[in-house]
Each structure stands twice: as structure tokens, then as C-alpha cells.
Image (tube, rainbow, N blue to C red):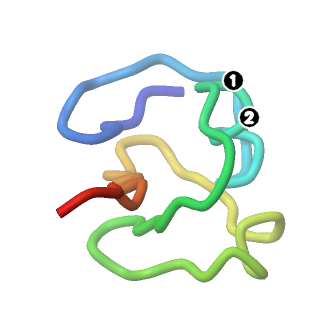
Amino acid sequence: MKIVLNGETREVRAETLSELLDECGFSGRVATAVNEDFVPSSLRVAHKLAEGDRVEVVAPMQGG
């Protein structure tokens, strides 16, 4: 299915947000939102993706 990940259109096989993170190589602590709604890590396994969803994945940065 086609989704928009961090502003870029991508074709993915993932059916859930958790699967998407694995498929795209995201690891560690990240924040996620689908269609501008925050999705906590505990709900990612059950959060189904749909064609055209806009997904944002943000990793915290260290430094200062």
C-alpha cells in the first residue's frame, strides 16, 4: 500500500504501525503520529494502516 512517511510517499507491505517501523528500520525510542494523531508505543501493534495514511516518525536528538 502507499503511505506518506515523514513527507515522502512510500510503497510498504506493513499492515500495522509496528510492522512499518520494523520494515523501515526504525529502532529505539521514537514518537509516532498517523494523520496528525499521536500513537503511543503501546498501541502501535494494533494500529492498522490504510492506503494514503500520513505517518510521522520522530527520534529524540541528544546534545545541546
Question: Toward the viewer: 41 or 15?
Answer: 41
The amino acid type of the residue labelled 2 equals: Asp
Query: Which badge, 2 or 1, comes first in the chain's sequence?
Result: 1
Q: Which residue is mark 2?
A: 22
Q: Which mark is residue 61?
A: none
Residue at left 71%, top 67%? 44
Q: Which residue is mark 1?
A: 13
Mark 1 element type: loop
- Write down the quadrant of residue 24 in the picture: top right
* In this view, the mark in front (2 or 1): 2
Q: CA distance from mark 2 to mark 1?
A: 11 Å
Task: Please give left or right for residue 29 compared with residue 19 in the image.
Answer: left
Tally the numbered discs.
2
Image location (x, y in percent) of residue 8: 23, 27
Specify the quadrant that holds the N terminus: top right
Sort mark 2 into few (<14), some (14-19) or many (20+) by Cα contacts within 10 Å. few
Task: Please give left or right for residue 58 compared with residue 11 in the image.
Answer: left
The amino acid type of the residue labelled 1 equals: Arg
Residue at left 71%, top 34%? 14
Residue 21 higher or lower than 25, as above or below: below
Image location (x, y in percent) of residue 16: 72, 52
Question: Toward the viewer: 45 or 13?
Answer: 45
Circles 2, 1 touching at the beta carbon (< 8 Å): no
Residue 21 higher or lower than 8, as above or below: below
Task: Please give left or right for residue 29 compared with residue 22 in the image.
Answer: left
